[in-house]
Amino acid sequence: MCLVLQVISSHPLLTRGVEETLASAKNLKIQILPPALSEAEACRPPVAPTLFLLDGCSLQTDLGRVAARCRARSPGSKFLALLPPGKSSGEEKTYLFYWGIDGFVELHATWQSELPKAIHSILHGQPWVPPEVLLAFVTQAKSLIDTQLMGGHFLTAREGQILQLLMRRLTNKEISCALAISERTVKFHVSNILGKLQIEDRRALSPWKAGGSNGKRWTGAEFSVVGF
């Protein structure tokens, strides 16, 4: 599978380690772009869909919002966060998953053996996240549907797909790219979903308030979780 990949990091040792690791990966054909020192450098000019590796050790900002802004410039992109070992809670990873980050690799002693597996999984549509993160996401979706779906209404299979992407804050354009359907079709489905769930605004589908977190770290006190 061909892949365009870019690391966003100011740590030269990390970017070199990523390049060396992926150069030896036999099941991935990878075009590695020069590493970007910042989000602005990575997204100027806009590029084709890319797998971005976000260095959580050096990026002094909210990784979720970085992913959202990069994806807006490059619809269809995927995101893998490289995190310091043992310093990211399940709540933090769940928060980032809702912001559209598709996987996490902690930079422990064996991270280089895990990285190709994580990339392979993400490229085939399977998130590389801890089981508790997926459980939290599924629980929230089920709670939302069970609580708010009116009697006699149900979501179609396509609406269910779109609901999951809406919960992860993807725009209509990004959903269109992800599912290979027109933005007009996405807009139609979104309208139906919100109507069936009796929700006026798609922002209500996120378990976090719109304000979110403005820093690199997110403590339990900074979360506003609904349905967990």
Image (cartoon, helix red, strand yellow):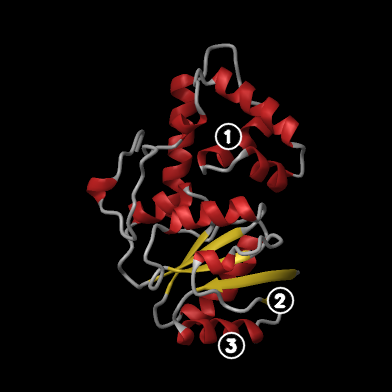
**Above or below — where is 193 with respect to 59?**
above
Assess disc 1: are there few (<14), some (14-19) or many (≥20) residues with their C-alpha within 10 Å of its C-alpha: many
- The residue labelled by disc 2 is 31
Amino acid type shown at disc 3: Glu
Residue 180 image point, x, y percent? 76, 44
Residue beneath the point at 38% across and 61% down = 61
When asked about the image quadrant of residue 195, the answer is top right
Residue 135 seen by the camera: yes
**Above or below — where is 182 with respect to 115?**
above
Residue beneath the point at 45% across and 78% down = 10
Considering depth in this image, is 31 or 45 the residue closer to the camera? 45
Residue beneath the point at 48% across and 57% down = 66
Considering depth in this image, is 214 or 166 the residue closer to the camera? 214
Kindly report which numbered mark, 1 or 2, lies closer to the viewer in this rendering.
2
Residue beneath the point at 69% across and 33% down = 186
Q: Is residue 212 left or right of residue 32?
A: left
- The residue labelled by disc 3 is 20
When asked about the image quadrant of residue 216, the answer is bottom left
Considering depth in this image, is 154 or 76 the residue closer to the camera? 76
Amino acid type shown at disc 1: Leu
Residue 132 seen by the camera: no
- The residue labelled by disc 1 is 163
Counting residues from the start of the chain, the first of labels 2 and 3 encountered is 3
1 and 2 marks in contact (CB < 8 Å): no
When asked about the image quadrant of residue 78, the answer is bottom right
**Above or below — where is 123 with respect to 204?**
below
Image quadrant occupied by the N terminus: bottom right
